[in-house]
Image (tube, rainbow, N blue to C red):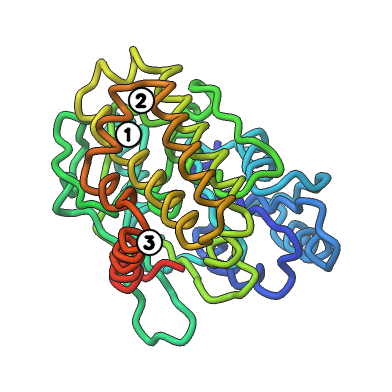
Amino acid sequence: MKLLSVTIPCFNSQEYMRKCIESLLKGGEDVEIIVVNDGSKDNTAAIADEYARKYPSIVKAVHKPNGGHGSAVNAGIANASGLFFKVVDSDDWVKEEAYDAILDKLRELIKSGQMIDMFISNFVYEKEGEKRGKVMRYKHAIPEGRVFEWKDVKHFHKGQYILMHSVIYRTGLLRECGLELPEHTFYVDNIFVYKPLPYVKHMYYMDVNFYRYYIGREDQSVNEKIMIGRIDQQLRVNKMMMDYVLERKQLIYSNRKCKQYMLNYLDIVTTVSSILLIRANTEESLEKKKELWNYIKEQDAGIFRKLRYGLLGQCTNLPGKSGRRISMEGYKICRRFFKFN
């Protein structure tokens, strides 16, 4: 069995996937790299096969009809033989020194009999045109350098949460919790990192800058204009996260710290949805914003009150044009600080 399976979802990725694969090859024989060609129309399939031929004990090429990012991740989980599982997008890469340190720590934990469900590390926003990336780290919020549980988690800042880029899951946990991402839907990375959380018992955090998250291509799904154009998919993911909290409410609410974190995460995603709808600034988008908040209220009045009357909910629901302008100014400040979009 491999130590770590890394899935690279690829769709028309010929221009940048080599850099991603090469950075992961440095993990050696303990790593399995699963390159999932999600119905690409360019040379992605040929490049995946090239690496599979050159490194047959490390690289596995999986070809499938186009189903979107979530479908490609599902294929990666289905084909994974590693004890742990990570997703690295084809336009991103990893840092060798941090990579080595993480693999060493995973080996050490297994050898000592300390099986963990989730391994967390930092990621770096590598924004086009900027010399230094913004590092997202968690050392003030979670214990560093030891196995810990939810009861040990401290306070996350607003706007800070564990993303797909930060996390390595135990592969068995993903299968045990029945994780299956929706097809033909963007922004499912939120679901990937969200749904396993109630099943996580033991975690480990290493303060190393491992994942390099590239931002700058105009066709990226996180580009603001594209996010507004795909707002219905953002809203779908937002509602799916809300629905999941209700489906697993007994399990989630049985762990106070897990509940708090998951509701805060839902709060942030709902804020992003609301801001994008304000940013679109059409009658239709403002009606969709109203419908989103009504949906949450109808599903669970308690969650609605927490989200609507918390700091973020109040800031994104200020009345009138002047209120929306204030909301946008707050959004711009957060965007400059956290380096997203």
Marks 3 and 1, the one that precedes in the sequence = 1
Note whether 316 is above or below 149 in the view shown: below
Apparent side of residue 280 relative to residue 330 in the rendered image (left or right): right
Quickly name the residue at label 3: 321
**Chain-order first, disc 2 or disc 3:** 2
Give the Cα distance between marks 2 and 3: 40 Å
Q: Secondary structure at mark 2?
A: helix
**Number of disc labels:** 3
Q: Which residue is mark 2?
A: 198
Is residue 98 at least partly visible in the picture? no
For the point 83% across and 64% down, which residue is it? 46
Q: Position of residue 105 (x, y in %)?
A: 31, 48
Q: Of circles 1 and 2, which is in front?
A: 1
Give me the disc on residue 262.
Answer: 1
Q: Position of residue 27 (x, y in %)?
A: 49, 59
Residue that protrudes farthest toward the front in the picture: 320
The type of residue carrying mark 1 is Met
Q: Secondary structure at mark 3?
A: helix
What residue lies at 35% left-to-right and 47% top-to-bottom?
Answer: 268
For marks 1 and 2, the one nearer the N-term is: 2
Label 3 Cα neighbours within 10 Å, binned few <14 / some 14-19 / many ≥20: few
Indicate the quadrant where residue 211 lies: bottom left
Q: Amino acid at mark 2?
A: Pro
Q: Secondary structure at mark 1?
A: helix
Circles 1 and 2: CB atoms closer than 8 Å: yes
Which is in the foreground here, disc 3 or disc 1? 3
**Nearer to me, 222 or 298:** 298
- Left or right position of 57 against 43: left
